[in-house]
Amino acid sequence: MKLIIEDDEGKTTVYPMGGREVTVGRKEGNTIRLMERNVSRRHARLFEMAGRLVIEDLDSYNGIHLNGERVLGRAELQAGDLVIIGDYHLGFQPEDDEDDTFDVPVTAPSFPLTERPAGAPLDEPTTEEVEAADPTAPPEPEPEEQPSVLRVHPQARLVAVSTELAGVDYVVRGDTVVGRVEDCDVVIDHPSVSRRHARFIQVGNRLQICDLGSANGVLVNDELCASRLLASHDRVELGHVQLRFVPGGEPFRPGPREREALEEAGVQVAPPPDVEDAASRAVTVSDARAGVRALTPELEASAAPAARSSSAPTARFRRPPGGFERTTEGDPPRRPAPAGRPEPAPESPTTGRVVAALLVISVVTAIALAWAIWSRARADDTWDRALRAEFEQGRFEDVMKMHAAHATDFADPEAARSLREDAEEKYVQDVLQKANAALEIAQADQAIELLQACLSVAPEMTACHWSMGVAYARNQQPEDAARHYRRFVELAPEDARVPQVLEVLRAYESSAAAPMRAP
């Protein structure tokens, strides 16, 4: 089987399989390296099994699509199948020869790279079509391929519209971490983006962005926020990188300034729709409506005599007691109201319209209220699951930040508060252990920095005040050391180390020139 690879610029490469196992991915060591960001480090594997070619998804982030359908695990390949990996199209044809060359460029793929059912045979021209073809006719111009940023993607994405990244799009979905380091699901390589900057969470059928304690914050439509549900084409700023959020299945519609930035980055953007044509069509429709309104009184005037001439009844009626009562000449007869009962007033058509409008408003309000309650419940449950996931992955500082930003957004506030307290305890223990290790190797400055973070979370933790006093004493800062020693004595008067601390404090207070020493 022969593998033909086409990138998003239309360049193709031929690779003879020859029965060998082939790995595809972005990382070095793969048989075929595809360098786009939407290709995972180890994306797919091609191998033969029982004489048939098989493709396997290696738990890639964006998946593998075979003839338009996502591959779950493994799938058998046949000649003519189309596989999509990121921005690359992979086609398969039988081997025509035994040439083992690699990276042989060709001008165009030898079969159309279009999606069609798996195993469908390749269409071959008939003899009549070959004979009818005119060899002297000039070739038809190939349609200009649309830039990838303007294509409609099935998944939601962020499109960069500023800095040198303008024109790059990043696929995002539920539980996606965006940041600068390679461990993130979406990597934005810019110095103003934090290592782990933000997280995307699925809330119903929408995506919510949450700040993970980044240095420059997250701005949505110029507003700094800890979390926000995103709508179509919201402007998201991560550091100095401006992006547009485009939901799945929608085209990207850049604004005037964004169009200029994309064109400067070399991305050709189609001109905006002709506004004058739309305005002229709107004027034509309004003129037609005006003509109808002008014609209506004439029609009513011409139809009135005919209506009056035909108003007399043609059938015979039995005259009721008291006879018929006529109110106006030309009107149909009306039965008089029984004695003692008031005659009902004629129903106004306006009343019916008002009642119908009120009924519609009531139904819409009830639906909106039910939707809001359902969305709130889904959002609450989502925050609980996100907090639990952060705790289980050992990111205790993120747990504390998330709980502080969304303390009222949890479905079970007691469980969330208990989880935050557990995270604080584990975080403090971890930081205290690192600080004591720094003190053992005479790194007092590093120990002080760690212990300050410890006291910001647990300001009354005696062990932190003890270690902070030792660190300041070794760093020749006696006043700060004395302050933390005194606080240690206040918080733990029964501690066995208190007599030593008091002795050190008395020596320091009796002679200001004497250096502070650690107990």
Image (cartoon, helix red, strand yellow):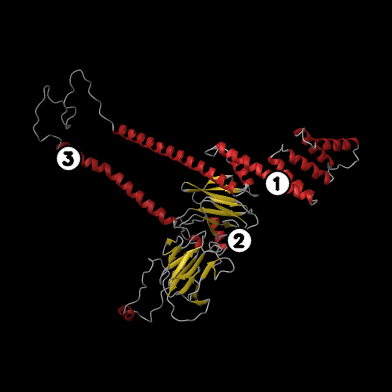
Mark 1 or mark 2: whose residue is earlier in sequence: 2
Depth check: give the residue in front, 66 or 132.
Answer: 66
Determine whether, in the image, residue 216 is placed left or right of residue 16. right
Q: Is the residue marked by circle 2 packed among few (<14), some (14-19), or many (20+) residues within 10 Å?
A: some
Q: Quadrant of residue 516?
A: top right
Q: Where is residue 432 in the image (x, y as percent from the top left)?
A: 72, 45
Q: Name the residue under label 2.
A: 164
Tag shown at residue 375:
none
Badge 1: how crowded within 10 Å, few (<14), some, or many (20+)?
many
Eye-nearest disc, 3 or 1: 1
Q: Position of residue 401 (x, y in %)?
A: 62, 44
Name the mark on residue 431: 1
Counting from the top left corner in percent of width and height, residue 135 is at 37, 81
Q: Which of marks 1 and 2 is in front?
A: 1
At mark 1, the secondary structure is: helix
Q: Earlier in the sequence, mark 3 or mark 2?
A: 2
| Mark 1: amino acid | Val
Report the disc number at residue 306. 3
Q: Distance between the residues labelled 3 and 1?
A: 97 Å
The secondary structure type at the circle numbered 2 is helix
User: How far apart are the two marked residues, 3 and 2, measured between alpha carbons?
Assistant: 77 Å
Q: Please indicate, yes or no, whether residue 221 appears anywhere in the rendered image.
A: no
Name the amino acid, label 2.
Glu
Between disc 3 and disc 2, the foreground one is 2
Residue beneath the point at 38% across and 51% down: 283
Residue 469 in the figure: left or right of residue 386: right
Rendering quarter of residue 417:
top right
Q: What residue type is labelled 3?
A: Ala
**Mark 3: few, some, or many residues within 10 Å (few <14, many ≥20)?**
few
Image position of 426 with respect to 157: above or below: above
